[in-house]
């Protein structure tokens, strides 16, 4: 039986693991894909206090190494639910994964959020063939090509900056005339010759091109060739030829597995305040998965500390 099971090994989850281990609690992190969460695919982090400049990968790997050096356990598995009570303790919890049932005294949900799709026809089929949600992962495939980035937050601005150093041209498409992301970034982009802003605009269609059959199959190669853009002010619709489209329109949480136990708001975020307490004593929520005003690396790390401290106090208070 673990003291604390942490669901998610992103910034919030790994920060929680560090704090809980330093308080002497046994910790198991459960992660569906890879450690690091969203920050691992961010090209450059320049706003984390005390670190002038670091890649998202190096930041995440530093957290990972720090947590494992403190003997936190990490297991790659898909959590499908949580139940109150476990064989060892009726006041504990059973965390259900796709392969096993794990017992613990407290749970920290740090499930983060996943990329929001545009929801356009053909979008899913074109992933990896013109559509990407990660500039650092896939930008290299578009070297000296023409790409578009959709979104107006820090992710879109950072992606556009990263791609402008690789690609011949970058179109930054945003649905409003002002960016949500940092002014310093948008100003730096505006000064780049190979970046064009297309503002007040939304993408209305993805146009594929069909190539030859994949040898040995009857599947035809399909790649993105152009996108349709509608100006929301004039209503004018235009086609834009692009080799790639990087979609950076924010994230959405994925907390349905816990919705029978913890309260979730209409957008899918776990309802918890700055103290990271959910409606269930012993279950805490940390980072982007919970209701909060500011979703930043710093606030995710802070939530890790707050949730772990609260979980340790909960365990100690209940004499377990
Ligand atoms: P975000 O800040 O939520 O921005 C999402 C952007 O996508 C907004 O500009 C939004 O437009 C637009 N959008 C949303 N839905 C759309 C739709 N259906 N169609 C078209 N556009 C749509 O998301 P993010 O940029 O991924 O950033 C998430 C959080 O991480 C933010 O707090 C951000 O500051 C932080 N972040 C930090 C760093 C860093 O610290 N280095 C790096 C990346 C991200 P509107 O503006 O009109 O709503």
Image (cartoon, rainbow, N blue to C red):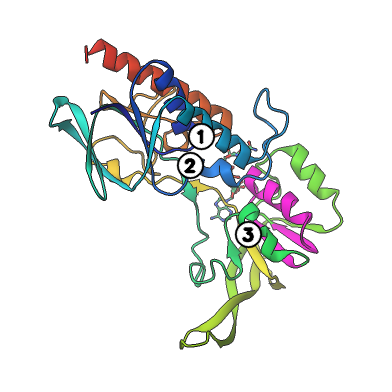
Q: Which residue is mark 2?
A: 35
The residue depicted at 74 percent of the width and 60 percent of the height is 171
Side of 299 relative to 155 (left or right): left
Q: Which residues are magenta?
A: 145-172
Marks 2 and 1 in Cβ contact (< 8 Å): yes
Respond yes or no on whether mark 3 lies under 8 Å from ligand 1.
Answer: no
Question: Image quadrant of ligand 1?
Answer: top right
Q: CA distance from mark 1 to mark 3?
A: 23 Å
Q: Position of residue 227 (x, y in %)?
A: 64, 71
Picture quadrant of residue 266: top left
Return the x and y of residue 157 as percentages of the image width and height.
69, 47
Q: Is residue 157 left or right of residue 280?
A: right
Residue displayed at 80% across by 64% down: 168
Q: Earlier in the sequence, mark 1 or mark 3?
A: 1
Q: Which residue is mark 3?
A: 138
Q: Looking at the picture, how far across and down is residue 231, in whole percent?
A: 67, 63
Q: Is residue 230 visible?
A: no
Describe residue 26's horizontal placement relative to residue 261 as left or right.
right
Q: Earlier in the sequence, mark 2 or mark 1?
A: 2
Label 1 packing within 10 angstroms: few (<14), some (14-19), many (20+): many
Mark 2: give few (<14), some (14-19) or many (20+) Cα within 10 Å: many
Q: Quadrant of residue 75?
A: top left
Q: Alpha carbon of mark 2 to alpha carbon of mark 3: how far?
A: 19 Å
């Amino acid at each position: 039986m673990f003291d604390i099971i942490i669901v998610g090994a992103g910034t919030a989850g790994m920060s929680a693991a560090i704090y809980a281990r330093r308080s002497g609690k046994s910790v198991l992190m459960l992660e569906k894909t890879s450690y690091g969460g969203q920050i691992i695919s961010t090209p450059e982090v320049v706003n984390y206090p005390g670190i002038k400049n670091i890649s998202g990968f190096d930041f995440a790997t530093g957290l990972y190494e720090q947590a494992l050096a403190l003997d936190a356990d990490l297991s790659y598995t898909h959590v499908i639910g949580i139940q109150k009570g476990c064989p060892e303790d009726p006041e504990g919890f059973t965390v259900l994964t796709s392969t096993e049932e794990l017992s613990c005294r407290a749970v920290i949900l740090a499930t983060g959020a996943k990329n929001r799709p545009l929801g356009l026809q053909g979008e899913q089929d074109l992933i990896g063939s013109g559509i990407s949600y990660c500039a650092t992962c896939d930008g290299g495939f578009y070297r000296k090509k023409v790409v578009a980035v959709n979104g107006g937050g820090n992710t879109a601005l950072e992606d556009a900056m990263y791609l402008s150093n690789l690609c011949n041209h970058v179109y930054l498409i945003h649905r409003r005339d002002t960016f949500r992301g940092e002014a310093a970034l948008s100003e730096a982009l505006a000064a780049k010759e190979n970046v064009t802003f297309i503002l007040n605009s939304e993408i209305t269609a993805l146009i594929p091109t069909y190539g030859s059959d994949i040898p040995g199959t009857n599947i035809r190669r399909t790649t993105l060739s152009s996108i349709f853009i509608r100006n929301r002010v004039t209503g004018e619709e235009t086609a834009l030829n692009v080799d790639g489209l990087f979609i950076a329109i924010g994230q959405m949480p994925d907390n349905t597995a816990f919705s029978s136990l913890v309260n979730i708001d209409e957008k899918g975020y776990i309802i918890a305040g700055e103290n990271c307490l959910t409606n269930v004593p012993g279950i805490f929520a940390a980072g982007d998965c919970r209701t909060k005003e500011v979703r930043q690396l710093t606030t995710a790390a802070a939530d890790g500390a707050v949730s772990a401290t609260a979980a340790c106090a909960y365990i100690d208070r209940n004499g377990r």
